[in-house]
Image: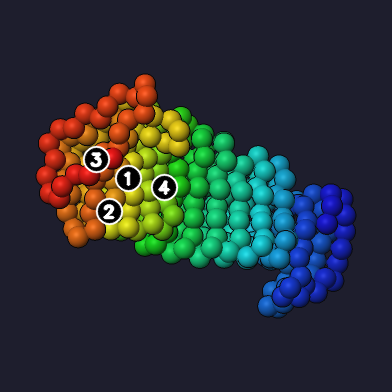
Amino acid sequence: MREKGSATGIQQSSQGALVATTRATRVTGTRADGVAFSIEQGAANNILLANGGVLTVESDTSSDKTQVNTGGREIVKTKATATGTTLTGGEQIVEGVANETTINDGGIQTVSANGEAIKTKINEGGTLTVNDNGKATDIVQNSGAALQTSTANGIEISGTHQYGTFSIAGNLATNMLLENGGNLLVLAGTEAHDSTVGKGGAMQNLGQDSATKVNSGGQYTLGRSKDEFQPLARAEDLQVAGGTAIVYAGTLADASVSGATGSLSLMTPRDNVTPVKLGRASGFPIARH
């Protein structure tokens, strides 16, 4: 439904796809589950998006209780507000403000530059991605949920998970939990403290980190992100507890390895890359490649 368009009395089947904007003059109908939906006067209510359906929430308009299933997408533009969106296999792109979004299995909420997510709840199998200059506060990260982000300028994150409160502010990440597709990139000149990398999670450190714990199924790398090597990267008190840690460049101090599947590897540096500096290490033998 394009801007200024109108359609009433719609019967949306379970396989139907609605493509609409909150600039539409008037849209009304009934979903397959019997719930009435509408778009009127810049406000969208109870919209169901799936199978290629898209709702664009334009500047200075709003949406409430949007349901985004597999194949659906809600785009929240700058100065727009979405409240109570539920993502179950679908996607929400936040350039404006999203309040009280629930992310279920397969759902993805992406907070773009200058976008803001407030009180997002991430359930098992759901993913929250926060990009540079994005903001996500009062997050509830449940077990098996994924958070993807970095310590880039402008990123502000706060919330709770099973190990307590976590945050990213001022280029410092504290008590992050990375699992089930979650990842954290610690950029050069920034820091991370007390991170936990669980099954399916990953952490790349180009800056400095301390007291990082890598559990079974987790992966940690020091001094490299893709083809970038960072000889000034540093890790202190790295605890490899069944996970995998690979050191490409930088300084590793006070490392320990435990668990039957725990491994720590030191990679041979490439040309023009400063060799790894190794401090105290304990536990299983360290592999050199």
Q: For the residue marked with disc 2, what is the amino acid?
A: Gly
The tag earlier along the polypeptide, 4 or 1, is: 4
Q: Amino acid at mark 4?
A: Asn
Image side of residue 133 versus residue 42, left or right: left
Cβ–Cβ under 8 Å for marks 1 and 3:
no
Mark 4: few/some/many CA within 10 Å (<14, 14-19, 20+): many
Quadrant for the N terminus, please. Answer: bottom right
Look at the numbered discs 1 and 2 and tell me whether their residues touch, using CB distance below 8 Å. Answer: yes
Q: Amino acid at mark 3?
A: Arg
Note whether 106 is above or below 139 in the view shown.
below
State whether residue 125 is above or below residue 12: above
Q: Position of residue 81 (x, y in %)?
A: 63, 48
Q: Is residue 193 visible?
A: no
Residue receiving disc 4: 183
- Observer-side mark, 4 or 2, equals 2
Pointer 1 residue: 220
**Rendering coords of residue 146 (x, y %):** 43, 55
Which secondary structure lies at badge 3? Answer: strand
**How many discs mark residues in the rendered view?**
4
Q: Position of residue 101 (x, y in %)?
A: 53, 57
Q: Quadrant of residue 51?
A: bottom right
- The structure residue drawn at horizontal position 58% and vertical position 64%, both measured from the top left corner, is 89
